[in-house]
Amino acid sequence: MAKSQITGKRQMSAHHVSHSNIKTNRWQKVNVQRKRLYVAELGRYVTVQVTTRDIRTITKIGLLAFAKQHGYKVA
């Protein structure tokens, strides 16, 4: 199952709405990518599975700060 390691975001239940307004259940999947990120504080690369939205935030504030906000320990 696609799930972000840091934030825990995963697929959500939604409705597929037809032209006649009939609603059938479907899954909204998250865009999870396996990303190899360099952590300057640790001096090494870390591989994590994160959503594309998480990648944008990590680019702005850094991996350790982002992980700390969400209570995730980067080893």
Image (cartoon, rainbow, N blue to C red):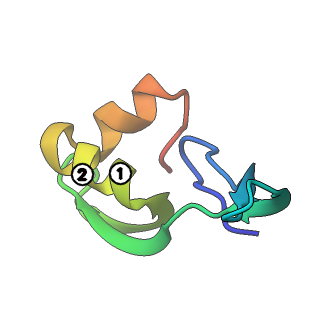
Left of 69 or right of it: where is 10?
right
Residue at 37% in and 49% down: 54
The residue positioned 61% from the left and 46% from the top of the image is 9
Q: Position of residue 30 (x, y in %)?
A: 56, 61
Helix, strand or loop under label 1: helix
Within 10 Å of the Cα at label 1, are there few (<14), some (14-19), or many (20+) other Cα atoms?
Answer: few
In the image, farthest residue toward the front: 20
Give the position of the N terminus as an image quadrant. bottom right
| Residue receiving disc 1 | 53
Q: In the image, which disc is placed on residue 56?
A: 2
Q: Is residue 11 left or right of residue 45?
A: right
User: Which image quadrant is residue 2 in?
Assistant: bottom right
List x then y, in percent, for residue 27. Answer: 75, 62
Query: Residue 73: x percent and y percent?
Result: 53, 39
Q: Which disc, if any, is residue 67?
A: none
- Give, as a three-letter code, the residue at label 2: Arg
Q: CA distance from mark 1 to mark 2?
A: 5 Å
Callout 2 crowding tier (Cα within 10 Å): few <14, some 14–19, many ≥20: few
Number of callouts in the render? 2
- In this rendering, is residue 7 above or below 59? above
Q: Residue at x 42, y 28 (%)?
A: 68
Amino acid type shown at disc 1: Arg
Q: Nearer the viewer, residue 1 or 43?
A: 1
Q: Nearer the viewer, residue 47 or 14?
A: 14
Q: Is residue 20 left or right of residue 7?
A: right
Mark 1 in CB contact with mark 2 (< 8 angstroms): yes
Q: Nearer the viewer, residue 31 or 75?
A: 31
